[in-house]
Every structure is written in C-alpha cells, then in structure tokens.
Image (cartoon, rainbow, N blue to C red):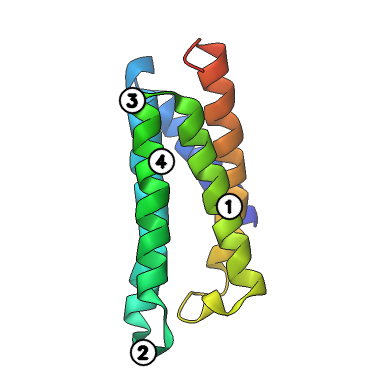
C-alpha cells in the first residue's frame, strides 16, 4: 500500500511541472499504464490467467478515462475509482490468478489518491 501512495505522490509531482492544460491528458496516460498491467500479467500467466476479462475491463476503464478528457475530467476520476474497485475484486475473487500478489493493494492506494486529486483538480479549475 505504501508503494502505491509513494507512486501517486511521484505522479502528482511530475504532473506539477506540466502546463495545466496537459495535466488531465497526463493522468489519462498514467491510467492507461496502470490498467494495462492486469491484462499483461494475465497473459503472461498462460491458461491460469483470465486475459479476456482483464482486457475487457481495462479497455472499458481506459475508454471512460479518455471520454472524461472530452466531456468532464470527473469521468477520469471515476475511471480511477472503478479501477480501485476492480483491484479490490482481485483480492476477494478468483481474478487474482496470474496477478502479482502486491499489485492490487498498490493499485487501490494509487487509484484512490489519483481519483481524489483528479476530482479536486476538475472542480477547482472549473472543468467539473
């Protein structure tokens, strides 16, 4: 969990040097990297992983985040929140097959911080 918090802090620190209009696209790109890890781990695990379900959810979450760039960054925040929920499901269901044990905990911490910050930034900048 601590690694997720540190990673979120580093991500927000990197975003701080971006011009404001590039912050949300940067957050969407980071979301793409984070959600892409689950299908990759599932495919690497072979027949015991669940790459199809991982891909479907990853694409849906990323689409929601990208749609948020066009409509409202609050949808990008929602995408991070949904990814946190998806990560929690890996801890309580059979979805964890093929996923590194620490990754869901990392994602929950990372995603919750990112969701909160993106939502705050969207409202604070009037993009919400």
Q: Eyeballing the image, is 9 above or below 90?
A: above
Q: Nearer the viewer, mark 4 or mark 1?
A: 4
Task: Please say if the residues under marks 2 and 4 sit with CB atoms less than 8 Å apart.
Answer: no
Which callout, 2 or 4, points at the residue further toward the start of the chain? 2
Task: Name the residue at 50% across, 10% down.
Answer: 126
Which callout, 1 or 2, points at the residue further toward the start of the chain? 2
Report, in whole angstroms, how far the alpha carbon at label 2 lies from the one at label 4. 29 Å
Q: Nearer the viewer, mark 2 or mark 4?
A: 4
Report, in whole angstroms, how far the alpha carbon at label 4 lies from the one at label 3. 10 Å
Q: Which residue is mark 4?
A: 64
Q: Which residue is mark 1?
A: 84
The quadrant in which residue 18 appears is: top left
The quadrant in which residue 63 appears is: top left
Which callout, 3 or 1, points at the residue further toward the start of the chain? 3
Can residue 19 be seen at all in this image of the molecule?
no
Report, in whole angstroms, how far the alpha carbon at label 1 lies from the one at label 2. 25 Å
Report, in whole angstroms, how far the alpha carbon at label 3 lies from the one at label 2. 37 Å
Report, in whole angstroms, how far the alpha carbon at label 3 lies from the one at label 1. 22 Å
Instruction: Out of 72 and 39, give the one closest to the viewer.
Output: 72
Local crowd size for mark 4, using a 10 Å CA cut-off: few (<14), some (14–19), many (≥20): many
Q: Eyeballing the image, is 115 above or below 82?
A: above
Task: Please say if the residues under marks 3 and 2 sit with CB atoms less than 8 Å apart.
Answer: no
Task: Please say if the residues under marks 4 and 1 sit with CB atoms less than 8 Å apart.
Answer: no
Q: Residue 70, labelled with which disc? A: 3
Instruction: Out of 11 and 23, give the one closest to the viewer.
Output: 23
Q: Which residue is mark 2?
A: 47
Task: Please say if the residues under marks 1 and 2 sit with CB atoms less than 8 Å apart.
Answer: no
């Amino acid at each position: 969990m601590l690694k997720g918090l540190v990673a979120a802090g580093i991500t927000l620190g990197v975003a701080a040097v971006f011009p404001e209009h590039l912050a949300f696209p940067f957050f969407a790109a980071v979301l793409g990297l984070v959600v892409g890890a689950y299908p990759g781990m599932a495919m690497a695990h072979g027949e015991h992983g669940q790459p199809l379900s991982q891909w479907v959810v990853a694409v849906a979450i990323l689409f929601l985040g990208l749609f948020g760039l066009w409509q409202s960054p609050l949808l990008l925040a929602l995408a991070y929140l949904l990814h946190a929920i998806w990560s929690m499901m890996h801890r309580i269901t059979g979805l964890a097959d093929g996923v590194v044990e620490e990754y869901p905990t990392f994602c929950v911490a990372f995603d919750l911080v990112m969701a909160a910050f993106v939502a705050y930034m969207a409202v604070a900048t009037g993009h919400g």
